[in-house]
Image (cartoon, grey):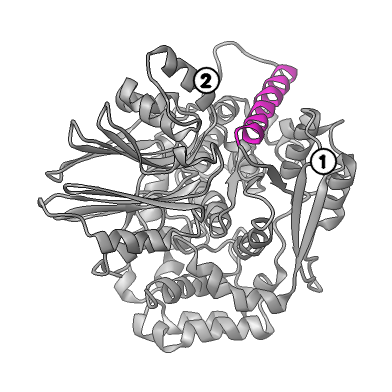
Amino acid sequence: MCGISGELRFDGQSPDREGLQAMLAKLERRGPDSEGSYFKDGLALGHRRLAIIDLSERSNQPMHDEKHGLSLVFNGTIYNYPALRKELQFCGHQFKSEGDSEVILKAYAEWGVKCLQRLHGMFAFAIWDDKQKKLFVARDRVGIKPLYFSINNDRLLFASTTQAIMAGDKSISSELDPLALHNLFSLHAVVPAPRTVLQEIKKVQPAHYMLFDTAGNVEEHRYWTLLATRPRHAMDEDEWIDAIHTSLKQAVHRRKTIADVPVGVLLSGGLDSSLLVALLSEAGVSGLKTYSVGFEDHPDEKGDEFEYSDLVAETFGTDHQRFVVSNSEVLPRLPEAFANMTEPMFGQDAIAFYLLSEVISKEIKVVQSGQGADEVFGGYFWYPQMHYSIDQGIGRFSKHYFDRSHDEYLEMMSENYHVEDYTSALIEAKLNSFEADEYIDRVLALDVTTLIVDDPVKRVDNMTMAWGLEARVPFLDQNLIELAARMPVEYKLPNGGKHVLKQISRGLLPDKIIDRSKAYFPMPALKFVQGEFLEFMREILLNDSAKRRGLYNPAYVEKLLKNPNDWLTQLQGNKLWHLTALELWLQQNIDNK
């Protein structure tokens, strides 16, 4: 797990060495173990390494294959690299290292862009092919690892973060993309690739690769599509349970064993992370390190789930630590956390992951996390609402999911950012693009391939990697999501959602964990806005920077400030916090760049 960066010139000039060094400086927290760079003609590659597999210098990057004229920078983990390595050795390739990075290089040398079909894992990488004079960049199937780029007539810049891109070229405009803002405020901070909130910075789409040559020509191709139709041979419930159980065990086992350092678990006490612990125990793992975080209680909501995480830790005898964050710690650290977000995020748990990762990273380099289970197996309350809805068209989705209507968006934003209802059109087109048997199959496929990418997955990657901590997400294993996408809805939505996971858990986990109501990461201070948190939000929204930017309609802001807890989204997000989060991100990353 690392941070990558680079530049490719289209005008025959040499790359900006100082610019690459500035990008690497911004990526240091993602890769604190070593730094490397490579320059040749109009190409520059940069790498910051977090050493997880093959801890020796032989796996430092940029990595080169002199025989084939290839150079690589890579962020991620390839879980099937040992088998691929053996296959490539059989094909005649010789290896100098023991890690997964060199396997990508040899796989490209052997199969070209078709190597992507063979790579199972999370990845974002760039390969310079000196013989063809082309740069090949690719991102994993569900976008677990980030990859941003900026392109103009003179050059391409790419990096793992937007902050690195902006550091690499100070002339990049801070102008905002109104269409991306419409996405942001409709889809609780999700801006589907290739857009970001910044007009001049884009991101590589999940399951896509791009080819750039020195003349500035660009190609983009999709290499994987999620199929959501039933298999030809029908399976009964027991067969589905066995198949999902086997696939999930394999996913968890891979993410435990493919590492040359210890691997822990982020244990929230919910079904998903608890099941990861149970499956690791079932596989014979002992001495597992687990970690939980909680916050101060609010009169209307408890701030932690320790009674559940403690129960799981006790049941399986894990080496468990829990971390309590007081409200007095949250507020001073918010700006710092937002300065480490590649894009603005609204999720309440971002600061929790940030602060927890700081503690964990002092002990361990890799953790498994339960992100993705709800989206893959239908765990959220809005899925049944959509499934049984009689609404037609985009209304069947937007009524239960969008944070605000298009009319409210126009009321909220200043006229400079008024647009047509772009998000409705985009989501409807994406839903219709899937080959699926039922409407809810389309919704879940959209979630897994698009919405989750720029919400919980990005949030966990950003906040853990800010401390050099790698988070692995077994519920987003390629084989598991392909299997689950084809499973009938009746094995997902019943029993409060995630029915098949609950059936697998029965007998493995305490019933108290399985039968509890669906919970969301508690952080009462950002949900029940009052006191110093309200004053903090008022300051962010009404300070000179916000006034100069002029994003919001002042009357709308005042309405929310007057009664902040009366204005919640359909998914129970605080609308005042949404406005504050974007403005805080802009002040930390644009005004201070």
Task: Report the residue marked by disc 1.
Answer: 514
Amino acid type indicated by mark 2: Ala
The percent position of residue 33, horizontal first and vertical second, equals: 51, 52
386 above or below 280?
below
Asked if residue 438 shows in the view, the reply is yes
Q: Under tag 1, what secondary structure? A: helix
Task: Report the residue marked by disc 2.
Answer: 83
Instruction: Residue at 40% x, 63% y: name it.
Output: 25
The percent position of residue 401, horizontal first and vertical second, equals: 55, 53
Q: Under tag 2, what secondary structure? A: helix
In the drawing, does residue 381 fall left or right of residue 163?
Answer: right
Closer to viewer: mark 1 or mark 2: 2
In the picture as drawn, the residue positioned furthest to the bottom comes out as 544
Give residue 105's quadrant in the image.
Answer: top left
Q: Is residue 467 magenta?
A: no
Nearest the viewer among 252 and 450 is: 252
151 above or below 384?
below
Magenta region: 238-259
